Image (tube, rainbow, N blue to C red):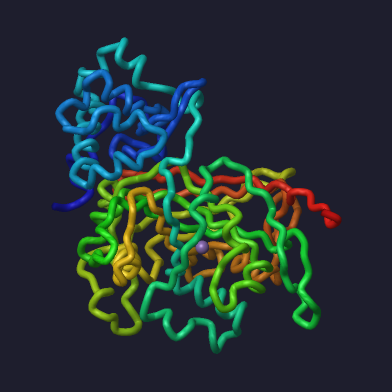
Amino acid sequence: MSFPSQQLLQLSSWIEVPAQSDFPIQNLPMGIFSEANTALRAATRIGDTIIDLAALQAIGLLENLSLPPNIFAQATLNNFIKTGKKSWSALRQRLLEIFDKENPELRDNAAAREKVLFSMENVRMHLPVSVGDYTDFYASKEHATNVGIMFRGKENALMPNWLHLPVGYHGRASSVLVSGTPVRRPMGQMRPDATQPPVFGATRLLDFEVEMAYIAAQGKPLGERISTAEAEDYIFGLSVFNDWSARDIQSWEYVPLGPFLGKNFASSLAPWIVSLEALEPFRVAAPEPVEPLLPYLQYKGKKAFDIHLEVLLKTPQGEQQSIAKTNFKYMYWTIAQQMAHHTINGCNINAGDILASGTISGSTPDSYGSMLELTWRGQNPLLLADGSMRKFLEDGDTLTIKAWAEKDGLRIGLGEVSGEILPAFPYDESQ
Ligand code: MN
């Protein structure tokens, strides 16, 4: 089958889709919403219209899918994710049918439409999954090289293991926040002057990391493993992710066990999860491996995705402006390799777990995925349109990451993840 197929491209919905929308009928992302004082429930989206999946099931339009009753009348997608890949795909096919402009089932039923459709303006989006575990990788060769040069010098930039395995660590699941939630500047211990003792205070080097999160399906039991060939069956979808980082806390604390308080104060997730099925037309080959790979990390086929990412910064005084553009396809280690590596020791994966790619940087300075790299640790501050300079993020700044794929007139977007920096919580040294 060739993608995008003519049939897929020609589909259009009876719901209006604004030009350049991230959400044509071909997308059908999933999220959790509420409106007014009603309960949280599952939704998809076409254009700027929210489609209440709980209501769609309640009025009988999803009857032939053999889904458990009230599977969408829940505050997270975890239980729906557990129904498995065939079930997700069957839902997608049925939604393509119901919202096809030729289908009168819901289109011509005003009373039913009233129950099912909401304007994006009138709803609130929530964290789409209950995150049991969150793993962060370090899978961009350009990013790992840049950070390595800054933290350890050019000779030791890429550690000896880096080209042989996807390096990762276990992050903090309970501080994963939905887009729009403000982020407090963390305080902590750091050593800004290597000849002096460490000091305590608010981080001075607050940063973002452009990442792609992939939401896991229910994996295999503890002790078993998932191969690169099977890996994508265990991925419910992709979502844009910002792994906020305090570089001064991080660089002092990380030896020898890795990231801790410099990372676990907040990570932000976009509200929409886009399926691999919707992203199928945008598959591309990943970069060729530099070193031969052990068999468990080898794979066949195109396992990377051509997804554009753009970083936008809004200062308290200025307009939002673009500060970097990168692409998910630059990642050295694919999501299939990351999943296979994660489970090669028998580690289990649960529905709703987040695996994140690590910072996505390209090869040119305007494609770097963090302030650390964009300003080269503050040496080359960004000059913004409002005349202000930025080495790192300041209080009142709002950082937004957008992601979208585009080909042959088809645009499938992942929406955006955004967060404003609040000043550090007051600290009383006498307490
Ligand atoms: Mn990260």
Q: Work out whether residue 405 or residue 226 is closer to the camera in this orientation and state it.
A: 226
| Residue 91 visible | yes
Q: Name the residue furthest right.
A: 430
* Image side of residue 314 versus residue 102, left or right: right
Q: At which x and y percent is residue 412?
A: 35, 44
Q: Name the residue furthest bottom.
A: 155
What residue lies at 29% left-to-right and 62% top-to-bottom?
Answer: 222
Q: Work out whether residue 234 or residue 292 is closer to the camera in this orientation and state it.
A: 234
Q: Quadrant of the C terminus?
A: bottom right
- Quarter location, residue 293: bottom left
Q: Work out whether residue 283 or residue 4 is closer to the camera in this orientation and state it.
A: 283
- Quarter location, residue 391: bottom right
Q: Is residue 252 above or below residue 14?
A: below
Q: At which x and y percent is residue 405?
A: 37, 50
| Residue 406 visible | no
What residue lies at 39% left-to-right and 28% top-to-bottom?
Answer: 50
What residue lies at 62% left-to-right and 62% top-to-bottom?
Answer: 261
* Image side of residue 301 versus residue 383, left or right: left
Q: Name the residue furthest front.
A: 431
What residue lies at 25% left-to-right and 64% top-to-bottom?
Answer: 226
Q: At which x and y percent is residue 352?
A: 37, 48
* Image side of residue 182 versus residue 3, left or right: right
Q: At which x and y percent is residue 296?
A: 25, 75
Q: Looking at the image, how many numbered discs can be counted on the residues?
A: 0
